[in-house]
Image (cartoon, rainbow, N blue to C red):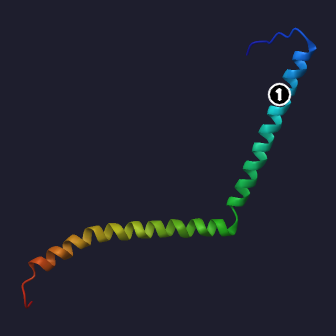
């Protein structure tokens, strides 16, 4: 990092003020992210996420089985002899 050269105390003060504001913004982002993380670990959110995950896995598996079985069943009905 290069050393900055200032020609007046006003420039130094302005730079310090900018750094102070950037530090405060970073701190507020951190506080916000911590709060959001805490909220995501509530019992209701965890339960909802688990249920959604199970549902999506179940329906995905169910759809895969149906995609395999339906053509087999259709083929079986087409080739089934009448009266059997």
**Relative vertical location of residue 21 with respect to residue 80 in this rendering, above or below:** above
Image quadrant in which you'd find residue 42? bottom right
**Quadrant location, the C terminus:** bottom left
**Quadrant location, the N terminus:** top right
Please state the horizontal and vertical placement of residue 30, each as a whole percent of the image.
Answer: 76, 44
Q: Name the outermost residue toward the bottom.
A: 83
Please tell me which residue lies in front, 67 or 10.
10
Label tally: 1
Quickly name the residue at label 1: 19
The residue that appears at 68% across and 69% down in the rendered structure is: 43
Element marked by disc 1: helix
Image quadrant in which you'd find residue 63? bottom left
Q: In screen coordinates, is 46 left or right of 15?
A: left
Residues packed near mark 1 inside 10 Å, few (<14), some (14 to 19) or many (20 plus): few
Q: In screen coordinates, is 75 left or right of 58?
A: left
Please state the horizontal and vertical placement of residue 31, each as a whole percent of the image.
Answer: 78, 48
The residue that appears at 72% across and 49% down in the rendered structure is: 33
The residue that appears at 7% across and 87% down in the rendered structure is: 82
**Relative vertical location of residue 37 with respect to residue 11 in this rendering, above or below:** below
**Relative vertical location of residue 54 with respect to residue 40 in this rendering, above or below:** below
**Relative vertical location of residue 6 with respect to residue 82 in this rendering, above or below:** above
Q: Name the outermost residue toward the right.
A: 9
Q: In screen coordinates, is 73 left or right of 82?
A: right
Please state the horizontal and vertical placement of residue 36, each as a whole percent of the image.
Answer: 71, 54
Please tell me which residue lies in front, 66 or 25.
25
């Amino acid at each position: 990092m290069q050393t900055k050269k200032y020609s007046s105390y006003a420039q130094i003060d302005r730079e310090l003020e900018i750094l102070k504001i950037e530090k405060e913004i970073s701190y507020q982002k951190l506080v916000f992210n911590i709060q959001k993380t805490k909220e995501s670990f509530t019992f209701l959110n965890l339960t909802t996420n688990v249920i959604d995950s199970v549902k999506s896995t179940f329906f995905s598996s169910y759809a895969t089985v149906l995609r395999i079985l339906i053509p087999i069943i259709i083929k079986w009905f087409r080739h089934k002899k009448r009266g059997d």
